Structure formats: structure tokens, C-alpha cells
Amino acid sequence: MTAAYPTGTFPATFIGGAAGLWRIDRSTAIAGGEPLPRAERLEVREGIAPTSGGVWRLAGVAGHTRYVGRAEKTALDAASPPLGRPEATMAALIPIRKSPAWWAMPQDERRAIFEARSHHIADSMKFLPRIARRLYHARDLGQPFDFLTWFEFAPEHAGAFDELVAMLRAREEWTYVERELDIRLTR
Amino acid sequence: MTAAYPTGTFPATFIGGAAGLWRIDRSTAIAGGEPLPRAERLEVREGIAPTSGGVWRLAGVAGHTRYVGRAEKTALDAASPPLGRPEATMAALIPIRKSPAWWAMPQDERRAIFEARSHHIADSMKFLPRIARRLYHARDLGQPFDFLTWFEFAPEHAGAFDELVAMLRAREEWTYVERELDIRLTR
């Protein structure tokens, strides 16, 4: 199947191995099973790489918003920094899988848990523009995770990043997370 | 990348070629460019087949709802017939790609066009339980279409199916469809 991704989508492959811009400082299984096999470095490759020389490989596609409405998008777009800022020498890759109960819910109920009850967007906004973020969707790719979220920040904001993930993990939305990894990186 | 699709997802590959349960009666490019190369038959294969002996190949993954709310889901689930009914000897495969303008909109604006202004769910409901349907998502797979919709119906409901597609094509939602094929089949 020749993959030709349309404008507005951002396919990427995260390859853990001996090479890559990012050094893997630690890799933790937060919920649901095994961590990934140990690797020294991470390469972020544009496109979906079907094979690689790495120890592990995760892929996803960033694209259109799934829950964000117009007012939220306007606020997010204005406050969100780009990836690749020179001062953002730290990163995190957080793969998660949500439960069958989450995916069985219709759109309105998932949105209600996500925002009305867990304030995912509103409360994450407070961490902008310190933390840059891109959400990759992986469920339709038959990957072991539904989402891979990539974050970049300066060392002085590492504490704020910890606060952000602790906040999200304490909310109702996270009761539907059945597998989660937390991979921290430095370049 | 070993694909392991979770429960609740239905990956499928549609293969046009010399083999398969379905005879291709006609294949029309409704909008935006070329039809698919001519093929006699269609095989619907479970899973994402990376290669095949076919003339053409389209793949997608059915799964969770993207716009449907709880009340709509309850009504749809009650009225929707299963695939594979013995009397449903006719089928249609309708691949579509929506425009960059569609995908650039946030969720609430897409939903408003889809249902509040185009009545996609409410008006399609009138055609149940005559027409069985499964929606495959293909955008995240780097496919040339965003959606592949598969329909099955008895010959006596072929007229109703034509009415359904004509109705959808006349609505505001369809102004965002930039490529569409219409493949009709019999078994």
C-alpha cells in the first residue's frame, strides 16, 4: 500500500535504538504492562517507516482535531509554541492506550469526560506557551497504543511539565487509560 | 510494523481484480479525477493487506464513532441491520476524500455541517433497516481517500440506495467532498 499522506497530516515514526538526536534518559511503564525494551537514543523520523534498525518502533499520524471546538482552537493556536525551539532541549514521549469502554462511547460522552469533567483543554492551556506538543493518532494503524503525545520544553520548565502530566493523570479521563508509558529525553 | 488491531476495530482491504465474492457491475468517478483501473471482481479481505495480486487496493479501519452522540447511537444501533444478510446480494463501495478546508475545521464546526445543517444521521436513518452500512476510515493510513463506505442491500432496495446517495450528495456536507468514486457490485 503506497502511503501518500495529505497536506495537514504529519505521519511520524519514533525509533528507539542506538541512533537519533534524542538521548533516552528514562522510560517508565506508568500503567498496564511492560516498558519498551531498553534503548539509548530516539530518532523521530518523518513518515511511517515500515522497518528500521531500531530496538523498538512506534508510529502515529498527527492531523485534525477530534474534540477541540472553534473557541478552544483559536485560543490554542494563539498560545501554542512550535516544535523545534532551540531552548527546548528536553522532550517526553507519552504513548497511551484507552480502554474498550472509552472507545465504545459515542462522541458526545467522550467529549464530556475529556473536557466538561476533566478540563483537559482548559487546564492544559495554563502550561502554554512553555510546553510544545503534538498529538499523534495510532489506533487506526494497528499500533499497541492509541495516541503518542510528543512534548518539548526547556529544562527550566521540566517541573511544569511534571505538574501537567500529574494533573491529567488525576482526572476522570485517565480512568480510561489502560496502558501508558512515559519516556523522557534530552538532546 | 506489526499491526495488531484492538477489539472494536475492523480493518479491511478491498481488492479489485480477477477474484472475489463480488462482481463489479460499474465503477464511476463522481468527482475529482480518475476512476480506478478496470477490474472484474472485488474481494473484501479482513485486515490491512500490504500487498495483493489485485489491480487496485483500498484499505480502511472501521471503529468508534466520530460525530454520533448517545441518542443517535441508540437509535442507529436499534435500526441498523448486520452485514452479510442472505438477501443483500447487492453492494456499493463509495470512497471519498474531503477537502483541506473540511479537515482544517474544529470538531464543532464539522459536526454542525454534518448533522445540524446536512442532517446526515437523521435523514440516513429513514433508509434503515433496508441498507446495511460500515464506515472505514482511511485518512490516517495514507490512503488516497479519507473514508470508504460499504453498503449492502437487497435488489428491491436498489432504488432506495440511489435515493440515499443522491440525498447526501445534494447537501452542504458534500461541498467538502473533493474526490468520490461509486462502485456497484452484485454477488
Image (tube, coloured by chain):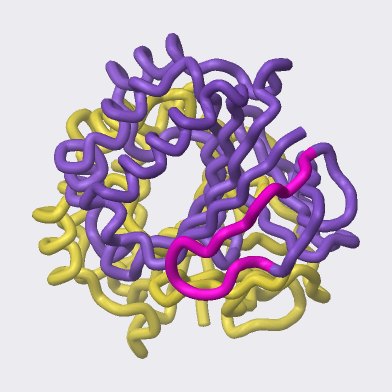
Chain colours: A purple, B yellow
Q: Is residue A132 left or right of residue A19?
A: left
Q: How many marks?
A: 0
Q: Position of residue B165 (x, y in %)?
A: 36, 48
Q: What are the residue bounds of the magenta stretch?
A: A22-36
> Is any part of residue A51 visible from this angle?
yes
Q: Residue at x 42, y 76 (%)?
A: B7
Residue nearest the observer in this picture, A59 or A15: A15
Q: Residue B12: horizontal and vertical position, in percent?
A: 57, 71
x 39%, y 65%: residue: B134
Q: What quarter of the picture does the N terminus of chain B occupy?
A: bottom right
Q: Residue at x 18, y 32 (%)?
A: B116
x%, y% of residue B24? 61, 69
Q: Is residue B148 above or below residue A55?
A: above
Name the one closer to the observer, B183 or A150: A150
Question: Residue A187: x percent and y percent?
Answer: 77, 33
Foreground: A46 or B103?
A46
Magenta stretch encompasses residue A178: no
Quarter-of-image position of residue A101: bottom left
Q: Quadrant of residue B86?
A: bottom left
Find residue B168 and report its image quarter.
Answer: top left
- Is residue A23 found inside the magenta-colored segment of the image? yes
